[in-house]
Image (cartoon, coloured by chain):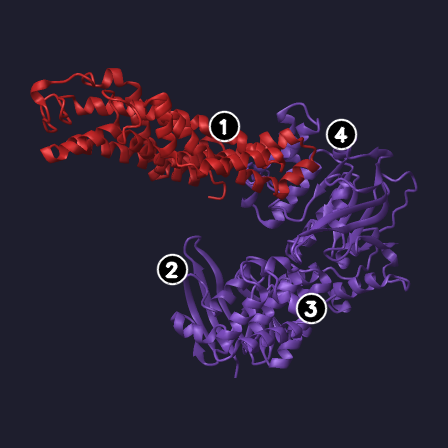
Chain colours: A red, B purple
Amino acid sequence: MTITLFLRRLSRHGLALCGLFILLIALLVSFLAPWLSPYDPLASFDGLRLAPPGTPGHLLGLDNQGRDVLSRIIWGGRSLLATSVLPIIFAALVSLALGMLAGFRTSAVSELIMRSMDMLFAFPMVLLAIALSAVLGSGYLTLIITLICSVIPYLTRVVYRDTRAEIAKEYVEALRAQGASTTDILFREILPNVATPLLVYTTSLLGGMVVFLAGLSFLGLGVQPPQADWGRMVGEGAQMMILGAPHIATAPALAIVLLSLAFNWLGDGLRDLLDPYQ
Amino acid sequence: MSLLQIAHLNVLFHRQNVQAVDDVSLTVAPGEVLALAGESGSGKSVTAAAILGLLPADQTTIGGSITFDGQPLLHQSTARLNRLRGHDIAMVFQNSLSTLDPSWRVGRQLQHNLRRLHPTMGRRALHDAALTWLTRMKIHQPEQVMALYPHQLSGGMRQRILIALAAMCRPRLLIADEPTTALDATVQRDVLQLLKALCQQQQMALLIITHDFGVVAALSDRVAVMQHGRIVEQGVTADLIAAPQHPYTQSLLAAVPGPNTTPVAAHHDSGAPLLHARGLGKDFWRRETQGWWPKMVPVTAVNDVSLSVQRGEIVGIIGESGSGKSTLARLLAQLTPADRGEMHFASQLVGSKDKASITALRQQLQCVFQDSLASFNPRLTLEEQLVRPQFRLGKVAQRAQAVARAKSLFSDVGLDVALLQRYPHQLSGGQRQRANIARALAVDPRFLLLDEPTSALDLTVQAQVMALLTRMHRQHALTCLFISHNLALVAQFCQRIVVMAHGQIVDDFPQHALYAADRHPITRQLLAASYLLPVDATDAA
């Protein structure tokens, strides 16, 4: 797949473009948070507690402690993207290695890897998060480890299954007949064919993981106050609903939905764009 | 009064804007066998789908009329069609593996269909009726076959079960779409005989769709030839084969491999053989799950095979599927290590433990497999796949050189150089097999191992590919080992013919001795199954 062909296809895929656009904006805003954010996310304006959106100088209003909601969303997005995207990229690389190692030849090692994955599958991840926060305390590290442990079994299964399927195809035999070595077959021919579905699956999975992470924070297992965090903002804002301030929970909730959708759209789009049969 | 009448049928596919069927008129009389012949893409399968109302209504525009026994078939409701489909009209599809439900045992599929036809039948009676049908289909051990899943059966057995499923409806019209294309020559002959017998027993009309004029000759009373969605010629089969009028019909007839009137020049080179194998053997382990505990049972695929091939020779290996010829090919190409025996290539011992000897072998010996789509990496352009092997085997130093060689090979095998930028699935079967041959030639080998290279192709395309191989053999001074189940094809192309059965070589003779009196019975059997056309007809064409 050449780059130009990929870009030409991308330009014709509305949903993928839409997802990519949202993600680029989110990444850009997170990266430039110190300059873009109008206020310090922790600074409070005492007289303006629970002020609604549209208050002069505060586009999305203020929360129950008088902190600017927009600034908190900008900073919260930064932490959410950092705790979701980077660990998942790491998990995808680990899974690629584990899955291909297990898939390319049946051996004791492959049994060991795949049965360990089965055990991870069986383990409830919220329980792991609680146990980790008991040992390490709540915070980024707990979130990241939980996230990595929850996605690795899924991703490894995908890589393992695809590697097995590719190895069994006749073209691998044809390659051997042409003098290709095992490393050659594994890294130059099979790796790209396995990495493509992994990329698609990882992107779609990120959408779910954004919601999962926000959920952990909502439960109080993630980022600790007063740090800005979308999940926690929804959790705390929900209590403000009855006080007639729905914006505190709604704004971060919408941000979560939008980011999750963007990942899903991009994932779906990549599946279509990278399919040579399209 | 005709049973099926098609008048001025037109089918237009919207998305591709293709007129797949263009003004086709046909009639089938009760009890008649009509063959609809043509290459893939000629619109014959679309015509069959139109009869059964299987074309997607939202993607096609259908014009003209189709009547069955006076009732219109076009633009009818599903409920109305279902009173005919599976009752008065039944169909046998080409791909028996994907047509049968993979998760249903054979017995259940048969009984399910029987129950639909005879709702009052009891369990015992259904079981017995299913058994009777399997027996009628000449399936051995029907009781055991009833308990098997489709993938556990051979292609020929599956095709018989499909025919049983269709015939048990006692249809007045049976439509069979390429029913024997995927089958071996001997199995094809048996299935065709079965179909013919059924037609006579049940006074059933048959519309058979095929690209093979051998099948047309063996089965049909009348034939209609289709090209580009139009019928170019139709008439009584015997007359049409004796004197084809349209050039397209003539080309279809010429493509059927017949007895060779111009024998291939025998090979005379008595030097040391290029390839010499002695006592090769290979066992596979099969899991038997009868009883409580699975047992591993050895199955001998190749047993004590000795073979030498002289430089420049073309040797054909034939045998039915399961005779071990493909396993032998894998042993010779060192894709599977042999359990017994040894092999020399260019007087060098080739061993599976000795990596250097295998690399040396690969530089000299290349393979072309049957399934051209599966033999290519689906996600790489053809150019990349022609360039990489040249680097792997150290034939070129620079990419530009490799690309130039890929281009010259592509034009050599008669492909447009622009196709190098395409992905494998974007080519037609014939084009892809040419690309496959070009890829094998990319490393400039001395020896080409061809495993059923044309079995998946239409006969006219097969003829073109065989002509290409003959030309490449001469041009590149190749030695070829050609594996096929079709004796007629092998006899046209090869100087020497080796016959395999049950993992062993049973016969080995020069091409001109094919009709000699002392041929092995298996050779005779394969020979009888290979020629479906009357012998004088191929001469005329």
Mark 4 and mark 3: Cα distance apart in space:
47 Å
- Could one spot residue B368 in this view of the protein? yes
Q: Residue A55: x percent and y percent? A: 9, 25
Asked which quadrant contains residue A103, the reply is: top right
Q: Is residue B106 above or below residue B3?
A: above
As helix, strand or loop, the secondary structure at mark 3 comes to loop
Mark 4 and mark 2: Cα distance apart in space:
58 Å
Question: 10 Å neighbourhood of mark 2: few (<14), some, or many (≥20)?
Answer: few
Q: Which amino acid does label 3 sit on?
A: Gln
Q: Earlier in the sequence, mark 4 or mark 2?
A: 2
As helix, strand or loop, the secondary structure at mark 1 comes to helix
Question: 10 Å neighbourhood of mark 1: few (<14), some, or many (≥20)?
Answer: some
Q: Is residue A54 left or right of residue B406?
A: left
Q: In this view, does A134 lie to the left or right of B81?
A: left
Q: Mark 3 lies on which chain?
A: B
Discs 2 and 1 lie in a common subunit:
no
Mark 2 and mark 1: Cα distance apart in space:
47 Å
As helix, strand or loop, the secondary structure at mark 2 comes to loop
Q: Which amino acid does label 2 sit on?
A: Asp
Disc number placed over residue B141 in the picture, else none: 3
> Which residue is tagged 4?
B355
Q: In this view, does B375 lie above or below A151?
A: below
Q: Is residue A140 above or below residue B350?
A: above
Which one is closest to the eye, mark 4 or mark 3? 3
Q: Is residue B464 above or below residue B85?
A: above
Q: Which amino acid does label 1 sit on?
A: Val
Question: 10 Å neighbourhood of mark 3: few (<14), some, or many (≥20)?
Answer: few
Q: Which residue is painted at 52% across and 78% down in the image? A: B122
